[in-house]
Image: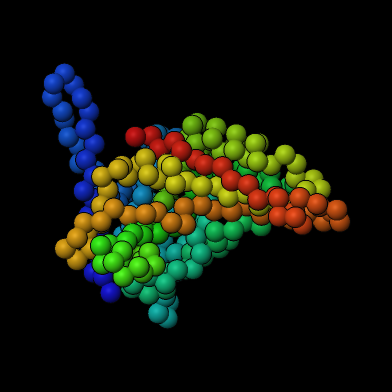
Amino acid sequence: MHRVTNQLHAHQTKAKGDSRAGRTLGFVLEKLQKKEHSGFVMDVIELESFVNSPPGGFTVESRAGCRVVKWDQENSCVFIDEIQSSKGKVIFCNSPGRKVIVRTLREYTDVRRQLTSKTIYILVSACTKTKVEEKRNRDVPVLGYYVVAINGSHPMIRWEMERGLDMTISSVAGESYIVDVDVSAALQGWVGESFQILVDVEKVKPIWKDTHFTIKYRSDALFDIPYWFGCSKRQFKVSYHGR
């Protein structure tokens, strides 16, 4: 079992004449302020840090060997399944999980409104292959879990979300579909290329997994040909990160 110490070894530099000013990035857990006042775009928070010091709008209760996270449903969309962390089970109360089921046009409209007006939370996995795993040809291990928060009401995020939904969902009447909303580009842009996790004595660059949530619409139409032939699965990416 690897002992993982979460450190951010990312550095962003800006050229100014012949000099470079370095700025060290750190995962600092802050209270998420009102989006419209702070200009907040996104944040990436280690799961244990999130649970131990929940941001505004979240509370955590300990119950019989697990931790239950409650959240403000007026300002947040949480798409996180139950997760077994290194310190026990974590349950996000009232979360539909990574897959959102939509059955009617009204439900789709409501989901679309939430995605473009609230902060979206999903859980991603930081994985990688160290030199040892590469030599032994092992599967990619999970080194840590991180909560990604994205401000759906930010003008650029809202534009990407609306454009992606419009392009992938041609009709919600009489057609079933599965749409993956992928945030890997925004996540990678936010943490930077130099982000590393310390595993024992080796610094490794993570491979991000589980960087999406899914909208599933099930039509009652009998002749939904694309769905039955597996042609209804689509995807679009959210890439804006504000850095």
From the viewer's perspective, tell me whether residue 76 is left or right of residue 126: right
Image quarter for residue 144? bottom left
From the viewer's perspective, tell me whether residue 168 is left or right of residue 118: right
Vertical placement of residue 132 versus 217, above or below: below
**Residue at position x 26%, y 45% in the image:** 194
**Residue at position x 51%, y 52% in the image:** 212
Residue 94 horizontal/vertical position (percent): 55, 63
**Residue at position x 49%, y 40% in the image:** 238
Q: Decide if residue 171 is in sight here.
A: yes
Pick the quarter of the image with the C terminus.
top left
From the viewer's perspective, tell me whether residue 133 is left or right of residue 98: left
Residue 52 horizontal/vertical position (percent): 32, 63
- State the residue in front, 111 or 166: 166
Extreme-top residue of the structure: 17
Extreme-bottom residue of the structure: 64
Pick the quarter of the image with the N terminus.
bottom left
Residue 137 horizontal/vertical position (percent): 35, 68
Residue 69 horizontal/vertical position (percent): 44, 64
From the viewer's perspective, tell me whether residue 234 is left or right of residue 170: left
Image quarter for residue 33? top left
Give the mark count: 0
Q: Decide if residue 103 is in sight here.
A: no
